[in-house]
Amino acid sequence: MNPSSRPRAPLARSTLLKMGARIAIVIALSTLSSYLHMRHTLRTEALAHLQRHVAERSQREQAIFALAEDNHAFLKKALEERIRELQREEVSARFDSLFKRLPDGTVRNRPELPESQRTVHVFIPRDVTLDTWFRTRLLAAYDVLSRYGPAFHVRFKTTYITFPEGVIAGFSPWTPNWSLGLASDFSLADFEDFILSQPRNNPRRQTTWTGIYKDPVSNEWMASGATPLDLDGHHVATIGHDVLLDELMDRTRNDHLSGAYNVLFRDNGQLIAHPGLRMENASGAYNILSAAEQTDVAVNLLGSQENATHLRRIFERVEKRDPGQTLLELPEYDEYIAVTRLRGPGWNLATVLPESVVTQPAILSARYVLLLGILSLLVELVIMYRVLQQQITLPLMSLSLATDKVASGEFHVELDTSRGDELGQLARSFRLMADQVQRREEELRHANEGLEQRVEERTRELKDIHLQLVQTARRAGMAEIATNVLHNVGNVLNSVYTSAQLAKERMANMRLEHVGRVAGMLQENQSDIGSFLTQDARGRNVMPFMSKLGQNLLEEQQEIVSLLDDVGRYTEHIGDIVKLQQNYARTPRIHEPVDLAALMEDALRINSAGLSRHQVKVQRHLTPLPPVMTDKHKTLMILVNLVSNAKYALDPMPPSERLLQMRLEKAPADRVRIVIHDNGTGIGPEMLTRIFQYGFTTRDDGHGFGLHSSALAAQELGGTLTVHSDGPGRGATFTLELPYHPVQQTA
């Protein structure tokens, strides 16, 4: 066996690689499908959980603000009742016992009073008129705060009541000297809760909440809620709570979903809580809108300009959401945002969840699925390899070795034909094919030897005939006759040569090339012989081809025998032509009586083999004429050449349309006309003037002698040879005109 023809990869390994690749694709697709499904499921669950978390978180965080509004409703009622009670009493003496005008002109708590009587701090600017109505309202506020302030102090840093005159009374036991420490020019006009309580700013007279601010005394971050009190259509007081925000900020920063973070901000852009916000040394709140363009502020409070830009995009996305929409997407940062508003202050509580937090569990699960699939694939491939090795690879190797032996000429092969599957059937068919090929090989060898012997005999006979023709020509002293004889014999020899060549090609094609081709095909596909024999279009034809090979070889043998019969028949015809030429050349070239109709039939008989082989139909239109005096040999040579050329001109035409017309008729001016017309390829105008030149031919195997010699012979006879054609594809007509000298007139 040629090493280069051995398989580059064993069948089992290549099959396993292909199956493994297909299974790996299935595993990859399954893993991808699982990942997409889990990603969708986890995303849906995560976003639902995110929304629930924000909703629950808002309920917890807004409780303190809702409680403050409930307290304000209670305090409004209590303050209104206390004011109306004090309107019936004398309040000046009690007012003077509790408060004192200091040298700076302001009125505050008396410093000499014990600390227990200074839990409610009062600050009255110097320009406030201390009339009875004002004293009544202030003492009513003092009494309400003294009575209910301790209860509210459990949840609220400060409970206070302000007045439109700029006066404040507050309960804050943690700072007993708060009012005494205020500057004399202290003014409430700059505080947001005081501004929001004014009728022009709060026409609906509802509770309003300030933004966050840092208390100047305690340095703690807080927000204030204020509820105005109107009596008889006049603004008389405002009830307020200070809510410490340190715990709210800490919860917002630290209490969040895994992987997520919380942001708390007002609609005006004021940032209340953010995981990156550093408020320890800040004197004022951070504004998302205005501070985002201030690099130093963004870096100091948020750590970087990128954080400020990111926070602003979150704020803008929340502001642009549709009413009632609680779940948002931020594609440029691959984040989801769940947002809600805290009832009371109306702050926006947003929880931001990165996309990676949602997809990470799906990726981990997909990895486990992929790992299990790979392990299963390896186990399956190991088992499949053992099965393929025993059931397919070894039997196919035996069959491959058998094909190598047959290709090398050794037909005795041993194969396992006991198996009942396709490989067993293939082995049995292969052995049968080898036996038939061996038998056909013997028959072909014998036929080849006999054919070669017959060809040699015929060749010797042709050589002898040729020698006789040459000797006859020499004896007659006519070199031209010898040339014409060879030319006419050559026309028939073409048929002999064609049949001999076909027989040779048939004989050459009947060698073991088919077997070698089958063996080569099996060797090329040996690595995947199972799929090749069952799935490949060529492989499925191997077995039918083997079964029909014997029948085809028998048909080839019969065809060769038929061709050899043609060789024998053509060879005998060559003898007839030679005898006919010998009869014509036996006498010197003299004018003698010639029957032109019979002479035309002789020309057709000389070309009959070629005409029959080319399937040319001949039509005769011969006018009966008496014999004429002319040179019989030259006239016959002209007619034979014209018929032979017409035969070749008809080759491109379909066999059913090939037609040769022969016409003999009397022409004017004592001349006789012979017309030979074919409906073949025709002649172009540029060739009509050259067609009778010596050496001019349009055939690859032509020599340019026939028409030239025929034209010269016609001139020697005293006649003319002309040609006419309407163009390529329209046929051609050759006309031979000879002097008309009937025998009767000559006599």
Image (cartoon, helix red, strand yellow):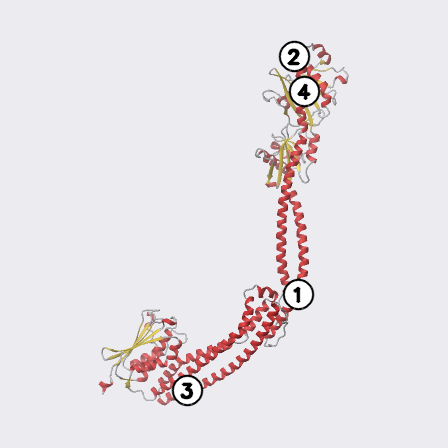
Which label's residue is closer to the chain start, 4 or 2? 4
Q: Is mark 1 on a helix, strand or loop?
A: helix
The outermost residue toward the front is 420
* Coordinates of residue 189 in the picture (x, y in percent): 63, 20
* Residue designated by label 1: 389
Estimate how packed mark 2 is, as few (under 14), some (14 to 19) or many (20 or more) residues with alpha carbons within 10 Å. Answer: some
Which label's residue is closer to the chain start, 1 or 4? 4
Q: What element carries label 3?
A: helix
* Residue designated by label 3: 465
* Residue designated by label 4: 75
Task: Report how far apart the C-alphas of labels 3 and 4 lie in the structure.
Answer: 149 Å
Residue at 64%, 61% (x, y): give it.
16
Kindly identify the amino acid type of the residue bearing the numbered disc 1. Gln
Q: How many labels does the image show?
A: 4
Which label's residue is closer to the chain start, 3 or 2? 2
Is label 1 in contact with label 3 (beta carbons under 8 Å)? no
Is label 1 in contact with label 4 (beta carbons under 8 Å)? no
Which label's residue is closer to the chain start, 3 or 4? 4
Q: Is mark 4 on a helix, strand or loop?
A: helix
User: In this rendering, which labeled residue sits more in front, label 1 or label 3?
Assistant: 1
Task: Report how far apart the C-alphas of labels 2 and 1 lie in the structure.
Answer: 112 Å
Of residue 729 and residue 144, the one placed in the foreground of this image is 144
Of residue 661 and residue 2, the one placed in the foreground of this image is 661
Kindly identify the amino acid type of the residue bearing the numbered disc 2. Trp
Task: Report how far apart the C-alphas of labels 1 and 4 lie in the structure.
Answer: 95 Å
Q: What element carries label 2?
A: helix
* Residue designated by label 2: 133
Kindly identify the amino acid type of the residue bearing the numbered disc 3. Ile
User: In this rendering, which labeled residue sits more in front, label 3 or label 4?
Assistant: 4
- The quarter of the image holding the N terminus is bottom right
